Amino acid sequence: MPPGDLSSSSPTRPDQLLERLQQAIVEGELAPGQKLREAELAMTYGTSRGPIRDALRRLEAQRLVTTTPNAGARVVALSEQQLLELYQVREALEGMTCRLAAVNMSQAQIDRLGALLETHEKEIERRAGREYFRQHGDLDFHYQIAVGCGNQLLATAVCSDHYQLMRLYRRKFSAHRGRPRRALTEHQRIFAAVEERDGELAEILMRRHISAARRNIERSIERRAKDEAK
Amino acid sequence: MPPGDLSSSSPTRPDQLLERLQQAIVEGELAPGQKLREAELAMTYGTSRGPIRDALRRLEAQRLVTTTPNAGARVVALSEQQLLELYQVREALEGMTCRLAAVNMSQAQIDRLGALLETHEKEIERRAGREYFRQHGDLDFHYQIAVGCGNQLLATAVCSDHYQLMRLYRRKFSAHRGRPRRALTEHQRIFAAVEERDGELAEILMRRHISAARRNIERSIERRAKDEAK
DNA sequence: ACCTCCATTTTTGTCAACAATATTGGATTC
DNA sequence: GAATCCAATATTGTTGACAAAAATGGAGGT
């Protein structure tokens, strides 16, 4: 078997490839805007162009790469405009997941969510407020809400379709000082609404939470633009 | 060139394939749940399996087919559960498009939207209230709102990612008697809010509009379940 | 008669070669 | 010296062949 192989066992090969490429993009190993040559990737990952093309198509569906006909694939370029657009989509989608989660989550799921927030709180204290956002997957508050909302389509949209893209953006425009603690407080209020099974309130709070994050980024973009103007 | 060829000109081949398969699925030519054999499709459309696989991956992203590893692709099965889920996603997404459209649409776009509604009104009178929903693409009210919202990502989600799926469902659970006229009235009220640049109201009305359609379907499902129980 | 197991067949997954298209670099011209 | 065109190169698109996995159908046993 070739050197850069995927070894191991169960998940199918394109799945493994997808995962590795996702990671490479989100971690910044493959830079934004970088050209993705099929032959090169095939060599690197010890396979042929077929499975690579397959994986690239899936990455395209997740918006992690853009493809132009006859000119190949590139890692998505992180325009500020698109970042703000993503937050508006999240506001709509996650607002709805939250409303449904309040109604549909089992008590056991709610308990787990509460426990998750407590570990987050301790994390923040330990790290003096830095880097709250670095959790992902099962450890992510938003992720858990989506999983618990009871709507498979919606959960997939939040947790698969847009999730990696969001992680990527988070890395770039990483959390500002003071924001993590604030975000935790907002999470706790959302949790309270979910716990009381108040879907309407849970939706409103989640939307405000995401909207606040968006405006935060908006400001930080403006600020940077001014700095550069000088 | 083979018989079932794609002839013509510019758009790339997988694009053409995608379009033809979309149409075949939405029109019911390929039945829900039907197995899609790559070799067979390749023969039918006068190409090889490579481009077909490509097109199938894109259809998967649009949720028009489901793929299981080593077992191939099937036309999406129309479960009632999933239909209701789709309406919840639409409520979230299109609510947001409508809010943004009210703020961002140009006056010219709004004028066109108004004209569109007038033609819809005449259509309904002509057909005595049947089949209002059969418009699609540029002629679709929801589609126009999404295009005009100014958020590319959101517009793509509504107009590409989920649009064909929605058309498919519409065909199956087609408009009920009396509903078309009602839907038009709701569209007109949404339009009024957009025209007044009232984003908040526009969102609320759009969400109610979609939510009403969902509950309508919910009832019709219940009714059918009772009929079958007898 | 029904179920289980195995061989056969069909179908998907992977690969390497070929064709078509885009990109690059250099030579030529103004 | 700069711009333009053309040839050479590299890259994507497509194809058919092969490998691996799943579905099928029949024989044998209970």
Image (tube, coloured by chain):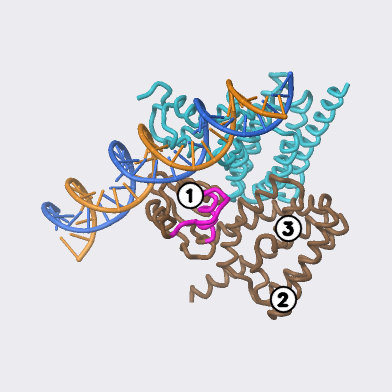
Chain colours: A cyan, B brown, C orange, D blue
- Kindly state the secondary structure of the residue where label 2 is placed: helix
Say if labels 2 and 1 share a chain: yes
Q: Is residue B7 magenta?
A: yes
Provide residue A40's location: percent of width, then percent of height: 49, 27
Q: Are marks 2 and 3 in contact (CB under 8 Å)?
A: no
Q: Residue at x 58, y 50 (%)?
A: B10
Q: Chain of mark 3?
A: B
Q: Around disc 3, counting alpha carbons within 10 Å, would you say few (fewer than 14), some (14 to 19), or many (20 or more)?
A: many
Query: Which amino acid lies under the numbered mark 1 shown in the image of this protein?
Result: Leu
Residue A28 in view, yes or no? no
Residue at image position (53%, 65%) is: B27
Q: Identify residue type, mark 3.
A: Gln
- Magenta part of the chain: B4-23
Quarter of the image for residue B184 reads bottom right
With A120 as the anchor, is D25 left or right in this view? left
Q: Which mark is residue B56?
A: 1
Q: Which residue is mark 3?
A: B144
Q: Which mark is first along the chain, 3 or 1?
A: 1
Mark 2 and mark 1: Cα distance apart in space: 37 Å
Check disc 2 and give the amino acid type. Ile
In terms of depth relative to the viewer, which is nearer, B124 or B218?
Answer: B124
Q: Which residue is located at x 61 percent, y 31 percent?
A: A136
Report the side of B192 relative to B175 (left or right): right
| Circle nearer the N terminus (2, 1) | 1
What is the tally of numbered marks visible in this picture?
3
- Say which residue label 2 marks: B124
